[in-house]
């Protein structure tokens, strides 16, 4: 079934919808005929995206939400159900990056990253799962991890571990829905390179030349070779509509990286950096 057939007339809630992949998913969802609830800490940006969507004839509301705050996530769900009724699709997408050696990244940056990338996804999923289960209607929960959930990368430890955690949580949630025979489809989204602001905004120790250069290289890489957020949004919504658990923006790359991960685990190899990643950290 096409994404339009599946989702038109439904309601999508997207966290981190003020930029990048979340914004791309929100705009594409609106173009498919969905009502869209845009959640982000960046008020100006979600107001702008909502204004664009409403001007196009679809319906969107911005709801300023910090995903680290469970009460704010509950208010987001209330706003969505009050305005549009049943939520069809909840996309837990908000996430941040950080660069630096594990022991040098400030305590508060570690905590903030884990809080946004892990707690935000976990509690967002729990809140929408409860409401979807209560309604008894078919629903979709998609959690945005990363291709990094299948790999390792020095100087991005908080990010990498957060994405492994999101994937693990999402696998468990999938199985819980199977146990309950619930009509809720669970998907893990593993984007590869998408041209967004994520590395521009990444807290980095600007005193360290190496860390700052690495951040700039990562930013240049995703903006030069990445797909656009709208392309990512389209591929992701098509994958969810197709009933996939593994949803990728770059299916061939994901398959290759997953195969490499499986071989590494099967042979209990020593941790090693992927060939393509060496250039990013060689001056360390
Ligand atoms: N861009 C990529 O290449 C890529 C690759 C793999 C995974 N991802 C994942 O995709 C997701 C979206 O990233 P992106 O690249 O679009 O980044 P982005 O920086 O363009 O967008 C992230 C959005 O999240 C919002 N946000 C940050 N903290 C928040 C909070 N506490 N509460 C609510 N919103 C908050 C930001 O304001 C921003 O609008 C992230 O989970 C990221 O890890 C991105």
Image: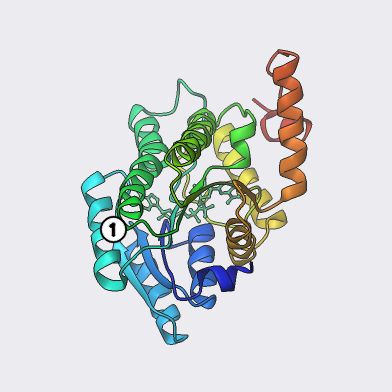
Q: Residue 122 in the image: x percent, y percent?
A: 38, 40
* Residue 205, x across and y down, in percent: 46, 35
Q: Is residue 279 visible?
A: no
Quadrant position of residue 61: bottom left
Residue 240 vs 268, above or below: the answer is below
Q: Within 10 Å of the Cα at label 1, are there few (<14), some (14-19), or many (20+) other Cα atoms?
A: many
Instruction: Name the colour scheme.
Output: rainbow
- Residue 15 relative to residue 71: left or right: right
Query: The C terminus appears in which quarter of the rendering?
Result: top right
Report helix, strand or loop for mark 1.
helix
| Direction from residue 20 to residue 282 in the image, left or right | right
Q: Residue lying at the far front in this picture: please name it.
A: 181
Pick the residue in front: 90 or 158.
90
Q: Is residue 219 visible?
A: yes
Quadrant housing the N terminus = bottom right
Q: Is residue 169 above or below residue 66?
A: above
279 on left or right of 32: right
Return the residue nearer the eye: 21 or 208: 21
- Residue depicted at 38% across the width and 46% down the height: 125
Relative side of 32 to 173, left or right = right
Q: Residue at x 48, y 23 (%)?
A: 102
- Tell me where residue 84 appears, x and y as whole percent: 31, 72
- Residue at horizontal 53%, vertical 77%? 31
Residue 143 picture location, percent across and down: 49, 47
The residue labelled by disc 1 is: 77
Q: Nearer the viewer, residue 175 or 204?
A: 175
Quarter-of-image position of residue 148 = top right
């Amino acid at each position: 079934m096409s994404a339009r057939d599946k989702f038109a007339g439904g309601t999508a809630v997207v966290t981190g919808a003020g930029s990048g992949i979340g914004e791309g998913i929100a705009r594409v969802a609106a173009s498919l005929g969905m009502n869209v609830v845009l959640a982000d800490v960046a008020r100006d940006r979600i107001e702008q995206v909502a204004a664009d969507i409403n001007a196009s004839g679809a319906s969107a509301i911005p709801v300023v939400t910090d995903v680290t705050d469970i009460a704010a996530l509950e208010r987001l769900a209330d706003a969505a159900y009050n305005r549009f009724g049943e939520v069809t699709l909840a996309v837990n997408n908000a996430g941040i990056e950080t660069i630096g050696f594990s022991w040098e990244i400030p305590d508060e940056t570690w905590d903030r990253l884990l809080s946004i990338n892990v707690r935000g996804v976990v509690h967002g999923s729990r809140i929408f799962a409860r409401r979807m289960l209560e309604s008894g209607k078919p629903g979709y929960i998609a959690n945005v991890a990363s291709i990094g959930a299948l790999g390792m990368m020095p100087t991005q430890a908080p990010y990498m571990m957060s994405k492994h955690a999101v994937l693990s949580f999402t696998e468990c949630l999938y199985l819980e829905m199977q146990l309950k025979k619930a009509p809720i489809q669970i998907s893990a989204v593993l984007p590869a390179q998408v041209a967004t602001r994520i590395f521009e905004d990444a807290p980095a120790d600007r005193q360290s030349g190496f860390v700052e250069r690495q951040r700039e290289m990562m930013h240049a890489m995703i903006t030069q070779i990445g797909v656009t957020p709208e392309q990512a949004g389209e591929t992701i919504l098509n994958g969810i509509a197709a009933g996939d658990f593994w949803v990728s923006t770059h299916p061939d790359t994901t398959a290759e990286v997953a195969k490499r991960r499986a071989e590494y685990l099967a042979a209990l190899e020593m941790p090693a950096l992927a060939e393509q990643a060496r250039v990013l950290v060689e001056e360390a």
